[in-house]
Image (tube, rainbow, N blue to C red):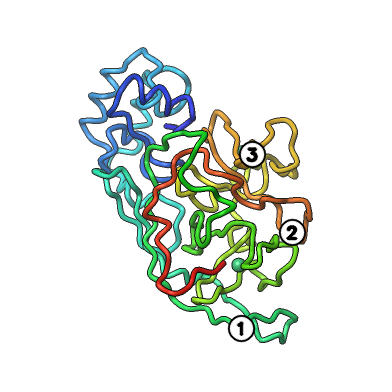
């Protein structure tokens, strides 16, 4: 599997400017030249890198470009790579290879019920869930930085997008309070802001995907290009509390399968100590077009 690990990103910068990689879970693993299809060009690139440890051509991630990678390529031959992604049907996913972005259009109306927010079930919110017009651009090739242009904790509105097109907001509500511990949500941990944008501040049960090794599945993508996984690192072990491969300040860590990735915490209802719930910061430079605000006063 081709993984945009932090090491891969740095070596890409210094070794080959053409080294691209789709975010984890998107596209074909053997679409080495990142053009949306597995073809002759990918075979040639693999042969070019034969016997090396080139991360881009080492599709199965075993450390060497060899026959295993070619077999994997044959397996994916003819696959519509652009159909491979975890986003659900209420979103539209396209690929901008020139700008190196996966582009996700979403109304933000989730694929699950919302509300009620009339107090009938104990949660009152004066706002009404309204369709938005959001275009999210997820970098294919994260550029790591210790000094990202956007500070997550200061950012109003979306900080990342989930696989059902609903954005994650940062931990804070309008008054600067930690939202998961102070505000009511519907049963999917969402609520609408002033402009009607439905959003999560923490993991949602609507995002309950798992991978076969007990690690949570992809629940969304950060605006810096890295994937966001659910709470679990392995069977019954949540990444937020796990000291084996602890999360950094941004709430991410690396492993050999997934490269660098973020985790959500367990929801507040299961662990009140899950701050920052989703991202604490961006580990790579976020795509700035994602921060365009609606015309009305910003709200969170
Ligand atoms: Zn993990
Ligand atoms: Zn909110």
Instruction: Identify the residue shown where x is 67% and y is 50%.
Output: 276
Residue 1 image position (x, y, % from top left)? 44, 32
Q: Secondary structure at mark 3?
A: loop
Location of mark 3 (residue):
249
Residue 193 image position (x, y, % from top left)? 55, 73
Q: Earlier in the sequence, mark 2 or mark 1?
A: 1
Q: Earlier in the sequence, mark 1 or mark 3?
A: 1
> Circles 2 and 1: CB distance less than 8 Å?
no
Residue 267 image position (x, y, % from top left)? 71, 57
Location of mark 1 (residue):
126
Left or right side of 276 for 209:
left
| Spatial separation of the CA atoms under disc 1 and disc 3 | 34 Å
Residue 31 image position (x, y, % from top left)? 31, 36
- Badge 1 crowding class, 10 Å Cα cut-off, few under 14, some 14 to 19, many 20 or more, is few
> Circles 1 and 3: CB distance less than 8 Å?
no
Tell which residue pokes out farthest to the left in this image. 40
Location of mark 2 (residue):
268
- Image height check: is 157 above or below 96? below
| Spatial separation of the CA atoms under disc 2 and disc 1 | 23 Å
Left or right side of 6 for 243:
right
Numbered marks: total: 3
Instruction: Identify the residue shown where x is 33% and y is 33%.
Output: 20
Left or right side of 97 for 163:
right
- Badge 2 crowding class, 10 Å Cα cut-off, few under 14, some 14 to 19, many 20 or more, is some
Instruction: Identify the residue shown where x is 51% and y is 55%.
Output: 159
């Amino acid at each position: 599997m081709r993984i945009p690990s932090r090491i891969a990103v740095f070596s890409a910068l210094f070794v080959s400017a053409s080294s691209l990689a789709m975010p984890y879970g998107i596209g074909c693993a053997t679409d080495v030249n990142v053009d949306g299809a597995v073809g002759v060009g990918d075979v040639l690139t693999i042969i070019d890198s034969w016997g090396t440890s080139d991360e881009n051509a080492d599709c199965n991630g075993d450390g060497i470009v060899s026959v295993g990678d070619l077999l994997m390529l044959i397996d994916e031959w003819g696959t519509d790579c652009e159909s491979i992604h975890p986003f659900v049907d209420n979103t539209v996913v396209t690929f901008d290879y020139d700008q190196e972005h996966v582009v996700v259009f979403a109304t933000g109306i989730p694929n699950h019920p919302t509300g009620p927010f009339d107090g009938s079930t104990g949660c009152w919110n004066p706002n009404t869930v309204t369709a938005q017009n959001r275009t999210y651009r997820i970098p294919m090739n994260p550029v790591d930085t210790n000094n990202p242009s956007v500070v997550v904790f200061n950012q109003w509105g979306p900080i990342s997008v989930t696989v059902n097109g609903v954005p994650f907001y940062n931990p804070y509500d309008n008054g600067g309070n930690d939202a998961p511990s102070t505000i009511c949500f519907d049963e999917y941990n969402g609520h609408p802001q002033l402009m009607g944008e439905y959003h999560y501040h923490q993991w949602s049960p609507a995002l309950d995907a798992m991978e076969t090794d007990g690690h949570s599945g992809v629940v969304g993508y950060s605006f810096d290009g890295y994937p966001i996984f659910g709470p679990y690192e392995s069977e019954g072990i949540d990444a937020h509390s796990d000291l084996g491969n602890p999360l950094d300040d941004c709430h991410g860590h690396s492993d050999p399968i997934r490269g660098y990735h973020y985790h959500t915490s367990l929801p507040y209802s299961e662990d009140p100590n899950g701050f920052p719930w989703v991202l604490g910061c961006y580990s790579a430079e976020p795509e700035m077009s994602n921060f365009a605000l609606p015309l009305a006063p910003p709200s969170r």
